[in-house]
Image (tube, rainbow, N blue to C red):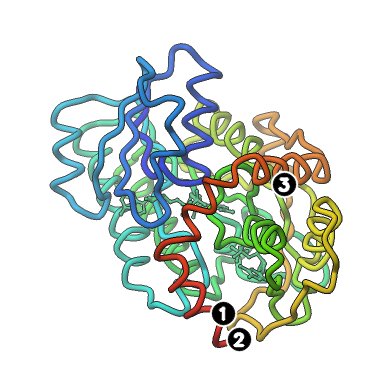
Amino acid sequence: MKLFVTGGAGFIGSNFVHYMLDADPAVEIVNFDALTYAGNLENLAAVEKHPRYTFIKGDISQLADVKTVFEARKFDAIVNFAAESHVDRSLHFGAGEFIETNILGTQILLDAARYYKTPRYLQVSTDEVYGSLGQQGKFTEASPVQPNNPYAATKAGADFMVRAAHKSYGLDTVITRCSNNFGPRQFPEKLIPLMIANALENKPLPVYGDGRHVRDWIYVLDHCQGIDTVLRKGKPGEIYNLGGLHDVPNIDVVRLILKYLNKPESLIQYVKDRPGHDRRYAIDTSKIQGELGWKPRLVFEDALRSTVEWYLANRPWWERIRSGEYQKYYATLYAQR
Ligand code: NAD
Ligand code: TYD
């Protein structure tokens, strides 16, 4: 199976590349990534010379970049991870790049799938397209799409383009909508790696609002396995929700990280809330469980502990990131709080 994987130098994409090369000797991967601030070839150092892996630098929102690759090779499937993925950046620095990569880029890939007759297209989407839940209930695939921040709105836009390509042209598409991931190699702008890195440097841990916002957390390799399952067995035109079945308030996650690192809770600093901050996410995974037999395997506490250990063991990885441009980002975003 020849896969065109986009965004494979980022957090989930790089975990997926590693996972797929290990899981199936019949898988060949072309990883197509623009190497934005979030793309890091260090994430793929271990497979750099792998005989079934090729890296190509390119931008999904540039037709010429995509065309060059598809003119030269045939693929069995496209798996689209490439995205601007951070809510706070979409709020503070504008949504232009989000629209270009997340919506236009998706459309260009769909056009490539159609024109070059790629048999399968998988869109990696997010539970954030559903917006926020009240105190009860969970997101099902039938929940209304009601994004509340620019990032989520562009991911929802992309999902609609995928739907349209299936309905209008009969393209064989599947969409996965997953909850919050955590694990090795996550860029330290997202909650869990940011809190681990700050705690290790004895810096304040900025918790937005009252810290009672609830997220469902899934270990990244469970997500990768879910994508593999949907890629092979998902029904064309369908959407599948994936989650870790572990929904907890942010403050509980932060406290657990401090406990594992043996750091004091006095490091927690409540800061100004994020605008449009979704209050609660929870995922109903019964469709994928019932139809495709997938469910998350890892226990949250064990997976979080092993993630903390990864950041302890790979200090140079995140220290390098935090020593560059990141400092400007952090100052801009967090000084205002
Ligand atoms: P990430 O920000 O870590 O990585 C994104 C990758 O995409 C980077 O390697 C970047 O260089 C690449 N990229 C960005 N713009 C590109 C472009 N125009 N062309 C080619 N490559 C480009 O993101 P992530 O957390 O690994 O998320 C991957 C996907 O999963 C995204 O589509 C995201 O919406 C989705 N998702 C993420 C989560 C989560 O918790 N992180 C949850 C559900 C879904
Ligand atoms: P994040 O990791 O940005 O993921 P998402 O916004 O896609 O869910 O944030 C997860 C939760 O943690 C979210 O409710 C916002 C909160 N949060 C903080 O409280 N402080 C922070 O510094 C960050 C980055 C997030």
Q: Earlier in the sequence, mark 1 or mark 3?
A: 3
- Residue 314 spot, x, y in % from top left: 60, 41
Is the C-beta of the residue carrying label 1 under 8 Å from the nearest atom of ligand 2? Answer: yes
Q: Is residue 268 left or right of residue 172?
A: right
- Real-space Cα distance between discs 1 and 3? 23 Å
Task: Give amino acid for label 2.
Answer: Arg
Residue 334 is labelled as 1
Query: Do labels 1 and 3 touch, CB within 8 Å?
Result: no
Q: Is residue 27 above or below residue 145?
A: above
> Horizontal and vertical percent for residue 249?
80, 66
* Residue beneath disc 2: 337
- Mark 1–mark 2 contact, CB under 8 Å? yes
Left or right: residue 273 compared with residue 108 = right
Closest to the observer, 182 or 72: 182
Name which residue type carries label 3: Val
The residue at 45%/46% (across/down) is: 10
Reading the image, the residue beneath label 3 is: 308
Give the amino acid type for the residue marked by disc 1 in the picture: Tyr
**Which of the 4 quarters of the picture holds residue 192?**
bottom right
* Crowd rating for badge 3 (residues with CA inside 10 Å; few <14, some 14–19, many 20+): many
| Residue at image point 34% right, 39% down | 171
Quarter that holds the C terminus: bottom right
For the N terminus, the quadrant is: top left
Image height of 210 relative to 242, above or below: below
At numbered mark 2, what does the secondary structure look like: helix, strand or loop? loop
- Distance between mark 1 and mark 2 Cα atoms: 5 Å
In the rendered image, residue 43, in percent from the top left (x then y), is placed at 46, 38
Mark 2, residues whose alpha carbon is within 10 Å: few (<14), some, or many (≥20)? Answer: few
Seen from the viewer's position, the closer of residues 129 and 93 is 93
